[in-house]
Image (spheres, helix red, strand yellow):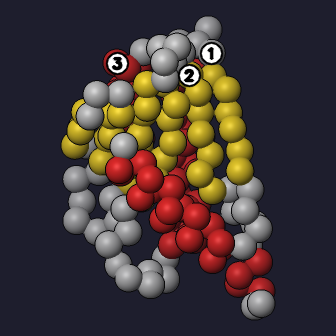
Amino acid sequence: MSSEETIMLKGRNELLTSASLEDIREAAREVLGDFIEEDKGDRITFTEPIPTCPAQIVAIKEPDGKFRIYTTSICSIENCQYVAKCIKMDVANLKLMKELLLKERPGVEIKEFEWNPTRVKEDIKLQKALDLLHRKK
């Protein structure tokens, strides 16, 4: 294994929040700027309106009324060499979402779930599988 493959990255972190959908929408606007909103019932996706590798913020409504939020990017380039940068950007976007939600509503409940893969290749395979599962819902 080369040294490039042993980079520690935080992949697919998630937030669980009691913030309202409107608060999440406003925070997403600050993170992404303009976005395309897609509402599939309990799953709302905010996507950057750019053609290559747009960032996404996904909010999934839980049965208890809270929202589970994660960030991802849609990579349209096969064997993309910038996937590690996209993953780091996704982590930064989620961190910013958390900060914005706490700033707007200081009493809002937010729990953070972390997953720390040790190898980029494993993270890429798992992230693609998770994205495929989320899209099928």
Q: Nearer the viewer, residue 124 or 37?
A: 124
Disc 3 marks a residue whose amino acid type is Glu
Label 3 crowd bin: few (<14), some (14–19), many (20+), radius 10 Å: few
Q: Is residue 13 above or below residue 112?
A: below
Q: Which residue is mark 3?
A: 22
| Res 107 quadrant in image | top right
Please tell me which residue is depicted at 33% across the width and 40% down the height of the picture: 45
Label 2 crowd bin: few (<14), some (14–19), many (20+), radius 10 Å: many
Please tell me which residue is depicted at 38% across the width and 82% down the height of the picture: 78
Q: Nearer the viewer, residue 96 or 131?
A: 131
Q: Secondary structure at mark 1?
A: loop
Mark earlier in primary sequence (1, 2): 2
The spot of residue 124 in percent (x, y) is 56, 70
Q: Is residue 76 above or below residue 81?
A: above
Disc 1 marks a residue whose amino acid type is Glu
Give the side of residue 57 with respect to residue 83, left or right: left
Contact between marks 3 and 2 (CB within 8 A): the answer is no
Contact between marks 1 and 2 (CB within 8 A): the answer is yes
Mark earlier in primary sequence (3, 1): 3
Give the side of residue 49 with respect to residue 13, left or right: left
Q: Which residue is mark 2?
A: 17
Q: Which residue is mark 1?
A: 109
Q: Is residue 78 above or below residue 115?
A: below
